[in-house]
Amino acid sequence: MTNGTFDRKGITRRTIIKSLGAAAALGLGGAGAARAQPKQMVMATGGGKLEEAYQKSIYLPWKEKTGISVVTTGNEGGRLKAMVEQKRVEWDLMQGPAEGLVVFGRQGLFEPIDYSVVDRTKMLPGTAFDTFVLTDFAAYCVAWNTKNVTKNPPKDWAGVWAHDGRIGLWKRPFQTFEVALLADGVALKDLYPLNVDRAFASLDKIKKKLVWWNSGAQGAQLLLDGEVDTGAIWNGRVHDPKLAGAAVDFHFNQALLVSDAWGIPKGAPNKAEAMKLLAYAVSPVAQAAFARLIPYGPVNPEALTLLDAKTRAGLPAAGPTNVMLNVDFWAENGAAIVERFNKWLLV
């Protein structure tokens, strides 16, 4: 955690530290109490392929449905805070990793979600929060290079830890501590609150074998090039290379499910329409359309009935063999753990 934000990267996920500070906001004014339907809305995102998928699966269908276009800008956390404090909010919605948005919600920077508009009864448990909504599931999962590991690939995190060769992990405690504890025998249901001392002890066992990476692109490349034999990566980073025949494979057993989330800035100029757009984003049709473009699982399980078996097989999904990242734990404990982790790296 740095300045109240987290750092994570998946197929199109930018690091929170870096990309919740991307571009300047668009200057669109607010509206009066009695006003006509807006012609456009502003969505702050991290850009990249994720934004491209939103455009095709959510924004364009939304425009066809309502006549309201969606324009995008960078999701800079400092900009959000300044706008809310100055009561000059220019964004209608904000997207970012859930572990970042939970911090902003706790700082009072988001509107409460109106669950009379957004149907939380259709969403999986643990995906609807007071001030933001999870919109997908990516997986921090076991992966390996198939040329380096030709026999008995790791079936779980204990198998990764037992490997004699090089092991690649994200150089951050969040997500990495979770899999360190699973490797040490902690049950999925008992993972939180994290036993931090035990996580460090587990990492100590493989410290000499570790190759650290700082971004999803780097982590995937290490696997693809055979610079590491096995380790952790977000599934979106290796899904397409695997399909294209690259020397990489992965599975979802004991995967840690991490999510993007959407929130509505406090004082958003088009709050009512923002709630409706958020509701559409988690509807079965939008969730299914999104999953066809990027291999992230839906938070609305009805979306799975709209997908073919091949697509479903490539999606992370909540279930008994994996666990969701507990964003509240990291919001409350992240700063202290990161400080201790950074010192541990130097020993």
Image (cartoon, rainbow, N blue to C red):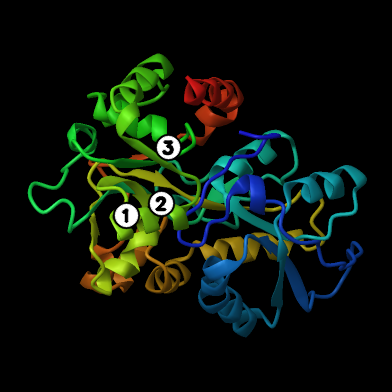
Q: Amino acid at mark 2?
A: Gly
Residue beneath label 2, please? 219
The circle drawn on residue 175 is: 3
Q: On the rendered image, what quadrant is the N terminus found in?
A: top right
* Residue 118, picture quadrant: bottom right
The residue that appears at 28% across and 55% down in the rendered structure is 226
The mark lying in front, picked from 3 and 2, is 2
x and y percentages locating residue 336 in the rendered image:
59, 20
Would you say residue 187 is visible in this rendering? no
Q: What element does badge 2 sit on?
A: helix
In the picture provided, is 85 more to the left or to the right than 329?
Answer: right
Q: Amino acid at mark 3?
A: Gln
The residue that appears at 25% across and 50% down in the rendered structure is 252
Q: Nearer the viewer, residue 22 or 60?
A: 22
Q: Earlier in the sequence, mark 1 or mark 3?
A: 3
Would you say residue 251 is visible in this rendering? yes
Mark 1 is surrounded, within 10 Å at the Cα level, by few (under 14), some (14 to 19) or many (20 or more) other residues, namely many
Q: Earlier in the sequence, mark 3 or mark 2?
A: 3
Tell me if label 3 and label 2 are in contact, CB under 8 Å.
no
* Residue 225, picture quadrant: bottom left
Residue beneath label 1, please? 223
Up the image or down, 293 lies above or below 126; here it is below
Mark 3 is surrounded, within 10 Å at the Cα level, by few (under 14), some (14 to 19) or many (20 or more) other residues, namely many
Q: Nearer the viewer, residue 55 or 287?
A: 55
Q: What element does badge 3 sit on?
A: loop
Mark 2 is surrounded, within 10 Å at the Cα level, by few (under 14), some (14 to 19) or many (20 or more) other residues, namely many
Q: Nearer the viewer, residue 77 or 231?
A: 231
* 3D distance between C-alphas at marks 3 and 2: 14 Å
Up the image or down, 314 lies above or below 126; here it is below
The residue that appears at 31% across and 22% down in the rendered structure is 202
x and y percentages locating residue 206 in the rendered image:
29, 28
Q: Amino acid at mark 1?
A: Leu
